[in-house]
Image (spheres, rainbow, N blue to C red):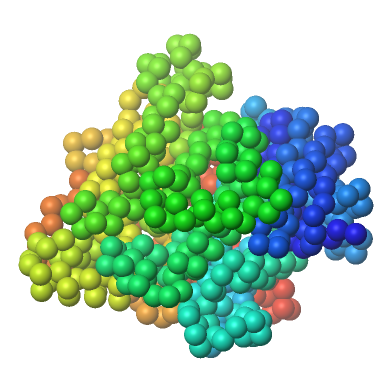
Amino acid sequence: MAELRLGPLLRYTDGACATVWVETDRPCTAEVRCADGARGTARSFRIADHHYALVPVGGLTPGTATEYEVLLDGTGVWPPRDSRFPPSVIATPGDDDGMRVAFGSCRWAAPPSGGKGRVGPDALDTLSARVAADPGGARPDVLLLLGDQVYADEISDATREWIAGRRDVEAGPGAQVADYEEYTRLYYESWLDPEVRWLLSTVPSCMIFDDHDVIDDWNTSAAWLADMRATDWWQERVLSGLMSYWVYQQLGNLSPDELAADPLYTAVREAADGTDVLREFAARADADPASVRWSYRRDFGRTRLLMVDSRAARVLEEDRRTMLDPGEAAWLREQVMEGRGDGDGDGDGDGDGDSDGDSDGAYDHLLIGTSLPWLLPHLVHDVEAWNAAMCGGERGPRWARIGERIRRGADLEHWSAFPSSFDALGDLIADAGTGPGAPATVSVLSGDVHHAYVAEPSWPGRTPDARVAQLTCSPVHNSVPVSIRLGFRFGWSAPARALGRRIARHGRCAPPAVGWRRTGGPWFGNQIMTLTLRGRSARLRLEQARANRDGTNVLRTVTDRELT
């Protein structure tokens, strides 16, 4: 009898359909049955002796929530008979519903080998406990996981022990993940957590990778990549990372229509064993990143979400270094601007000033999800821009060599380390937020930097009609060393800003085309942000996971403010 190994994960949802992802222990037919009669089935596919299914569920009613169960070959496997959680549900948005978008990044399932100090309560676990205690309350409508869903380079003691039982941990990448099988162990460790498993079964999720999903500072520079490719273990690592990401994360980001049109998904499902097909795809993606698009778009009523790949899509050559390759940048602009410019400012083109939702792609809120923050503390921004100039040869070969060492040692590889891309994103955001049909808000959602803050940009001689903000939230569950706390607190200060300007002058860096100021934070801890979007209003709440004296954990509000 087939059994459930991981899942179910509720992934894509809209008003009429959804997808549910599962991993099983053997080939089978997976079925989802909803209490309201909606249902769907899918035959499992095989990758490296693991079995998966992504079940499309049709016939859902907009604006409703229905309980569901999962069956494998006709036998019920979810919910478990001894479950202490409420039934999992598929909730579909209605035409006039608001949206609660929760987001964060950087989650250790368990601290890595060697320990990293006190980590504290897991914000995702704590969110799950709250939603389970009050299923009809203010639960998220979607959960955005903005990178570092797993840590391939910082594994737990339990995973290290498991890996040591199958190979020599002193060889190759050492006590890090080496191949696809070891990646499956990371997801098993992370998603089998009871609270997280239940939360992901009942709250739809959208995901994008960051560096630790493959390796720390993935694609920092062309020199870094050349060094990695010279090792005897990197090729297997990066191919396995991309293969496992496609299976465990990317598939669920896509709609049923997108999946039906995806030749890779078709080929994998039709093959008796899809391993070679998927491996060939990953090899092409590694050799030619521009041949694959990991970024994607989701529309939730009057809210548009663009999840942007800021890792694999990079152009690393120093003379044309950009965060996004030209095709990716063009795609992003097209998705941002589609449906704009109808002339009456309400997005529906009827001239009555009412956002009646009948427009072709117009939106009230634009969310740009990128794992790496666009706006950083000013000192960090200036150091990264200076470093990019040094590595690009602005001060000669000696400074270029010094710059590369500093770049790697200090993790200088955010948007500000790609100055032309930083300015281009700023121009795009200003264009999106200005003129007829402009949304009420444009929010850049990010993680990575192990603290949370709000920053708001301004453009000389230009004032967008939309409220624009950088909203950064991490970690969900990770360590926050004292050095990070002190460094980022100082990085926002006036003395740090003056120091940054001096450093930028040494690099002959042009001033950024946009200014910005911090309007909230920095906040440190295991935390999660939630945007509540209703009509053209937006409200932001940041909550941190705290331990009570009785041993329970709770999410405590740190800030709760209007963005519009």
Q: Position of residue 121 (x, y in %)?
A: 62, 73
392 horizontally vs 59: left or right: left
- Residue 75 in the image: above or below residue 338: below
- Residue 478 in the image: above or below residue 512: below
Residue 145 in sight: no
212 horizontally vs 496: left or right: right
Q: Position of residue 148 (x, y in %)?
A: 51, 64
Residue 80 in sight: yes
- Residue 23 in the image: above or below residue 387: above
Is residue 152 or residue 539 the one in the foreground? 152
Which quarter of the picture shows residue 258?
top right
Residue at image position (50%, 68%) is: 236
Q: Position of residue 213 (x, y in %)?
A: 51, 64
Is residue 84 or residue 490 the one in the foreground? 84
489 horizontally vs 35: left or right: left
Q: Position of residue 410 (x, y in %)?
A: 30, 73
Residue at image position (63%, 69%) is: 181
68 horizontally vs 292: left or right: right
